[in-house]
Amino acid sequence: MRAKILNLKSQEVWVKEVIKSWSEFRNRPLAKPAPTGATPTKRIPPKLLSLLWLFAIAWVGFLWNLGNIGLVDETEPLFAEAARQMTVTGDWITPYFNGATRFDKPPLIYWLMAVAYRTLGVNEWAVRLPSALCAIGLTCLGFYTLSKSQEEGSSATDSVTDLTDVRKQEEVGWKPEEETENQHSKLKTRRLPLFFSTPWIGAALIALNPHTIAWGRTGVSDMLLVGCMCSALLAFFLGYTLEEQRKQAEFSTVSASRFPNKWYLTFYVLIALAILTKGPVGIVVPALIIGCFGLYLGNFRQLLREMRPVSGILIILAIALPWYILVILANGQTYIDSFFGYHNFQRFTGVVNKHSAPWYFYFFVVLVGFAPWSIYLPVAIARTRFWQRSYWRRQPRSAQLSLFALFWFGCIFGFFTIAVTKLPSYVLPLIPAAAILVTLLWSDIIAGNEPENRRTKLEKKPNSLPRGLLVTYIFNVVFLLIIAGATFYCYHWLGDDPAMPNFPQAIQQSGLLIVGGTIWIITAVAIALLLWQRQQRWILVANLIGLVAFIIFGLTPAYKVVDINRQLPLRQLAQVAVQQKLPGEEFIMVGFWKPSLVFYTQEPVTYYRSLTKGLDYIKESKNPTSPSILLLGYPEKFEQLGLQPNQYQLLDSRGAYQLARVPRTAFR
């Protein structure tokens, strides 16, 4: 028996050596070596080019003009000020805003902002840098994952193809002309420009889309959650494929170590950080995705053995649990009811802060937030053939990235569609999955690969396109024209914010709408011409150039116009308030809620949305140290409070606001 086993092993080694030798023979260079004494051509190493590409993406998408506009009310200043107050009070356990506890989110985002304050000072750059770095980190890990998947997938495919070719040649004989044609086909595919490689496309699609750019440049916890949770999912897939490599290297599938492999370990650490960013959602959603993925493939139990969940749970608890214990000890049942009850359970089961939307809300969010790549999502999803379970169960793990991305996308989309409270940022974690799906589709398009079920015995027309792709390309052109039209005429829909009543005229006079609309029209025309010439691989490049041009020449300058009209007046009045405020004088804002005043004045501000409640508070409050108050509001709010111009001292007026010193006796 032992002799038979040794004989089988020797045969297996012999087959592997044959495959390896045959692969080396087929992949040998066809060109002759350069003559002796010839000057070798210096080329930039591909790794250096890849680093430059990632830097360019990061700069355009997240770092360029990151701190050139002020904090945007209402959410961003809440996080910024809570982090600043941590640095002032030294209380790193309980977050505070404007003197009151803030239990909306766990502390990781505040800690990172506070570290940035200590490094860069208290400014907009420091507020947004954690979000930008998370987006950049996710983009780089996506690039790495696609690179590894491409290397392992092509290696597995080449081995299977080579073995199949050997068997076919043994059966039917070797035909040199077919072999030469096959070699030229492979070399043609491998000699594609580097910017057409799967990792390059994937990094661009993960980073350069409206949703990721918007939240990657905003100082809130959403991008931090996406960075931790989505990086954890990518780390899971890397660990998942690493186990297969161990098996192929004749090690046992499950290591004898008590700890999971390095990528599974990274997964657990990132999940713990996600829990410290937004709470239970940081582990519930990834567990749902991985569970559905494993159940579909039928290897769920094997996954559990590989991942060693007991060790993983201990790692997660060691990182995330201490803060939760400390904050509950400090605040008791109040924290439990507010964070776990209101901000988690109630957001899922009921409407919070009037954020309700119909069930199809996220279809529009994904369509616009992932534009223009969202047009290709239906074809990319169909490309996975998710209904062919037996097919996927036969595939090597490295070839299952598109299926994993589909479960990633579908589970998040379904989970938050079921949730009653709906916000556009909730589906931000599915954007990297959508980017991977579309990237793999474009890799097939660029390589000239078509699904097998589209091939027929009939002779194909030259340069013909599959019907699904042809419709998608046409819709790509139509969609960009719709965006162009919306850009030209959107000033008609921008007059609802009382904080910037003159914004529609300002944005129209700036000429940015004409620039933005023209960019999309040019892009649409370019895509139509490329489609006419059957140069479909360059359609991707046209979309990317159009999007980058829109970001540089349209979107970024538009941010500045919004800031000048909406946020700059508040910053200017905050400076005036700091200069004019008397000792003990209370600063009150009535009629609306603008948290940026607290951040820029670094003083407590009393807010009352209701004029009646604000008026009652002013009448009942007694402050013997100051007979007056600083009052900020719209001019019409002063009239509604019953104040006449001769009853207060107007200190300044900027934009839609005015700041005045009002004697308390004026309210009695």
Image (cartoon, rainbow, N blue to C red):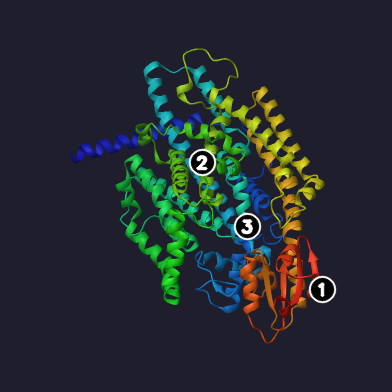
Q: Alpha carbon of mark 3 to alpha carbon of mark 2: how far?
A: 26 Å
**Residue under the image location 30 percent in, 34 percent down:** 11
Q: Position of residue 410 (x, y in %)?
A: 45, 42
**Residue under the image location 30 percent in, 37 percent down:** 10
Instruction: Give amino acid for label 3.
Output: Thr
Q: Nearer the viewer, residue 174 or 435?
A: 435
Instruction: Give amino acid for label 2.
Output: Tyr
The residue that disc 3 covers is: 218
Q: Nearer the viewer, residue 138 or 291?
A: 291
Q: Position of residue 618 (x, y in %)?
A: 65, 76
Q: Quadrant of the C terminus?
A: bottom right
Q: Position of residue 346 (x, y in %)?
A: 44, 58
Q: Alpha carbon of mark 2 to alpha carbon of mark 1: how far?
A: 53 Å
Residue 476: assigned label: none
Q: Mark 3 or 1, which is nearer the eye?
A: 1
Please identify the residue farthest to the left as the structure is shown. 1
The residue that disc 1 covers is: 646
Q: Mark 3 or 2, which is nearer the eye?
A: 2
Instruction: Give amino acid for label 1.
Output: Asn
Answer with left or right where residue 170 lies relative to residue 470: left
Answer with left or right where residue 95 lies relative to residue 602: left
The residue that disc 2 covers is: 360
Label 3 CA crowd tier, 10 Å (few <14, some 14–19, many 20+) = many
Please tell me whether mark 2 sits on a helix, a strand or a loop: loop
Q: Quadrant of the N terminus?
A: top left
Q: Alpha carbon of mark 3 to alpha carbon of mark 1: how far?
A: 42 Å
Give yes or no for contact between labels 2 and 1 (Cβ–Cβ under 8 Å): no
